[in-house]
Amino acid sequence: MKRATSLLAASLSIPGSLAQVDVPPNFVPGVKWQIVIQNTIDPNATLQPTDAVVWDLDLYHVVRTPEVVTTLRNNDPNAILICYFNAGLAQTSDCDYDSRWLDSGLLGNIYDPEEPQFSDERWVNIKNQTARDWMKDRITLARDYGCDGVDPDNIDGFLNDEDDDNGTGWDLSQADYVSFVTELATHAHSLTTLQNHTLLIGQKNAPELVEQLSDALDFAVLEDCKGLNDEEDFTFCEDFQAYITAGKPVLSIEYPSTLGDTETGACNPDGTSDEQYAASCATDQGNSDFSTVLKIQGGDGELNGCTQYCSGGEPGTEVVVTATDPELDGETCPSNSTGTS
Ligand SMILES: *[C@@H]1O[C@H](CO)[C@@H](O)[C@H](O)[C@H]1NC(C)=O
Ligand SMILES: *[C@@H]1O[C@H](CO)[C@@H](O)[C@H](O)[C@H]1NC(C)=O
Ligand SMILES: *[C@@H]1O[C@H](CO)[C@@H](O)[C@H](O)[C@H]1NC(C)=O
Ligand SMILES: *[C@@H]1O[C@H](CO)[C@@H](O)[C@H](O)[C@H]1NC(C)=O
Ligand SMILES: *[C@@H]1O[C@H](CO)[C@@H](O)[C@H](O)[C@H]1NC(C)=O
C-alpha cells in the first residue's frame, strides 16, 4: 500500500509535458529528413527524395498551399510533417502579421542591422503573455492544418541582449526564453495531431538551453553545429547528444559553400567539393546519430529544395532537388490563418 502510494505520488510529480507525449514510432535518431523553407514545395511535382520520412516546411507555406500535406502523405502515409515558424520574431509574410503584430506594440528591433535581407523581421517581446498566446495560436494552426510537429525558430534572442546590448529591444535573458519555450511545449503537448499522436515540438539551435529544455522537447533542429562557417571553438553538436541519448532525433543542417549558388539558389548537381563533403559529414564532433543534410545558405538559395545527404554515399552523390514553386508563396492567406476569426 505504501509502495503503491509512493509510486502514484512519483507518477503525479511527472509534468504533463513529459508524461503524455505519444511519438510516432518512426520518429527516431537517424531518421531521414528534408527541410525546404525558402519556397513552397510544388504539390503537383513528384516528391524528391522519395524516402525522406520527416519534412520540415514553413507553416505559412503549408497554410497557403494545404495540398502539400496530401502530397507528403500520398508519398508516405507515415510521413512526419514538421512546421517551421518564427517564434522569436514576427515577419511581414506571416499570415497574422497585419491583423495582430503590426500595431501591437510587441515588436522590437529588426533581426540584425548587419543582415538587411532580414529587415522585414522584428524581435517579439516574448515576456508578454499576449505575444505568447499568439505564438501558441500558431502552434494550434499547425495542428489544424495537419502538421505533426513544430520547429519554433529564433529562440536565442538573448544572444543579442548580452552585455547590455539590448539588440532585440526587449532586454531578453536565457531564462525568458526557457520560460517561453516551456510554455509553448506544454501547449503543443496538449494537442493531438490529425494522425492521432501528440503534437511534437523541437529545440532550434541555442546550445546554451539544452540542459533546461531537452527533457521537455521532442527533437532538435541545428544549423552549422560543426562550426564550419564560424571561427568559434564550441561544443555545439556535442551538447545535443542529450537528445540522442533520450531517443530523440537531432536534425542537423550544414552549409558547405560549394553546394550551390547562394545568389540564384542553383544547385550544383555534383554536390559539394570533396573537402567540404568530408568536413560536413564526418561524425567526429559529437554529432554521431544526427540526421545531417547539406543545404545552401544565403541569398535566394537559403534552405531551398537543394540538398545533399551524407548517408554513406560517396562525395558527389545523393544530391536531390525538391521541386518548389515560388509563385505559391504569394497566395492570399485563408481567413482561418490570420488569427482574427
Ligand atoms: C496542380 O494541378 C492541378 C491540375 O492540373 C491544378 O488544377 C492545380 O492548380 C495545380 N496546383 C498547383 C498548386 O499548382
Ligand atoms: C502585453 O501586450 C499587450 C498588447 O500590446 C498589452 O495590451 C498588455 O498590456 C501587455 N502586457 C503586459 C503585462 O505588459
Ligand atoms: C480554413 O479555411 C479554408 C477555407 O478558406 C478551409 O478550406 C479549410 O478547411 C480551413 N482549414 C482549417 C484547418 O480549418
Ligand atoms: C531596450 O531598447 C528599447 C528600445 O530601444 C528601450 O525602449 C528599452 O528601454 C531598452 N531597455 C534596456 C534595459 O536598455
Ligand atoms: C484518429 O482517430 C479518429 C477518432 O478515433 C479516427 O476517426 C481517425 O480515423 C484517426 N486517424 C488516423 C489517421 O488514424
Image: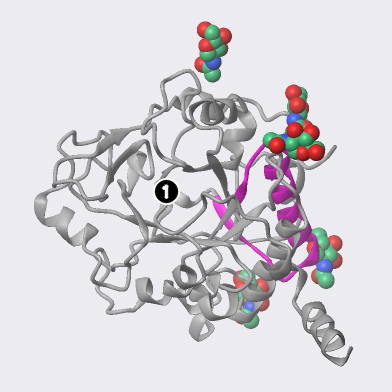
Q: Is residue 244 above or below residue 134?
A: below
State how the image is colored. Answer: one colour
Q: Is residue 154 above or below residue 325?
A: below
Residue 164's spot in the image, x, y percent? 53, 84
Q: Residues within 10 Å of mark 1 (few under 14, many from 20)?
A: few
* Residue toward you, 257 or 161: 257
**In the displayed structure image, the side of residue 91 where residue 204 appears, left or right:** left
Q: Quarter of the image containing the N terminus? A: bottom right
**Residue range highlighted in magenta:** 121-149
Residue 121's spot in the image, x, y percent? 55, 52
Quadrant in the picture for residue 107: bottom right
* Residue toward you, 254 or 33: 33
| Residue drawn at 68 percent across, 63 percent down | 185
Q: Is residue 121 visible?
A: yes
Quadrant in the picture for residue 122: bottom right
The kind of residue tagged 1 is Gln
Q: Quarter of the image containing the C terminus? A: top right
- Residue lying furthest left: 274
- Residue lying furthest front: 1
* Residue toward you, 253 or 310: 310
Residue 333's spot in the image, x, y percent? 67, 30
- Which residue was labeled with disc 1? 117
Q: Would the CB of label 1 be found within 8 Å of ligand 4?
A: no
Q: Is residue 145 visible?
A: no
61 part of magenta stretch: no
* Residue toward you, 265 or 112: 265
| Residue drawn at 28 percent across, 54 percent down | 255
- The quadrant of the picture showing ligand 3 is top right
Q: Is residue 324 above or below residue 147?
A: above
**In the displayed structure image, the side of residue 284 where residue 146 appears, left or right:** right
> Mark 1: which secondary structure?
helix
